[in-house]
Amino acid sequence: GFVSLIEQGGAVIGVEPLHMISYAGHAAQFLGNFIPSGMIFIPSKDGIGHQPDEYTEWDDVVCGANVLLHTILATAEQPDMLNAALKP
């Protein structure tokens, strides 16, 4: 499925996947009813997110962006999976 494409995107740059369940309301929660969805989390200092004190090291931001890039490229190489998921 789509999560495996995210894992492939991470593998390209040597990132090991850590599967997490997020109970927060994110766009993927709603989009998942219509298209394959997943989320790429990057670490924040002391686990603080969505607050003014949130801080993430720039290297982690770049890493997350590269996982996203390679996920997009992996998805482009497998259009049949995406097309099948988009059919009613």
Image (spheres, grey):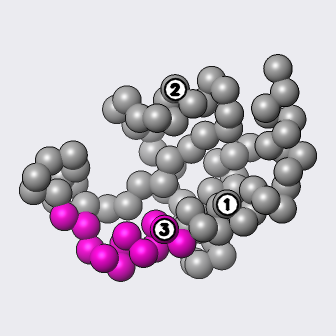
User: Where is residue 5 drawn, in percent x and y?
Assistant: 70, 56
Q: What's the mark number on residue 72?
A: 1
Side of 66 where 85 appears, left or right: right
Name the image quarter holding residue 66: bottom right
Query: Could you tell me which residue is drawn at 61 percent across and 40 percent down?
Result: 37
Cα–Cα gap, marks 2 and 3: 22 Å
User: Where is residue 9 drawn, in percent x and y?
Assistant: 64, 66
Q: Earlier in the sequence, mark 3 or mark 1?
A: 3
Range shown magenta: 55-66
Side of 51 where 56 appears, left or right: right
Query: Could you tell me which residue is drawn at 56 percent across and 62 percent down?
Result: 68
Secondary structure of the residue carrying tag 2 is helix
Query: Could you tell me which residue is drawn at 19 percent across and 64 percent down?
Result: 55
Q: Amino acid at mark 1?
A: Ile
Name the image quarter holding residue 16: bottom right
Label pair 3/1, CB-CB below 8 angstroms: no
Q: Earlier in the sequence, mark 1 or mark 2?
A: 2
Give whichever of 23, 64 is nearer the camera: 64
- Examine the rendered structure and indicate whether residue 2 appears above or below residue 87: below
The residue beneath circle 3 is: 65
- Examine the rendered structure and indicate whether residue 9 appears above or below residue 47: below
Label pair 2/3, CB-CB below 8 angstroms: no
Check disc 3: other Cα within 10 Å, few if <14, some if 14-19, many if 20+: some
Cα–Cα gap, marks 1 and 2: 20 Å
Q: Amino acid at mark 2?
A: Phe
Question: In the rendered image, is residue 8 in sight?
Answer: no
The kind of secondary structure the magenta stretch mainly shows is: helix
Q: Earlier in the sequence, mark 2 or mark 3?
A: 2
Q: What's the mark number on residue 30?
A: 2
Q: Quadrant of the C terminus?
A: top right
Query: Could you tell me which residue is drawn at 84 percent across and 27 percent down?
Result: 87
Give whichever of 81, 47 is nearer the camera: 81
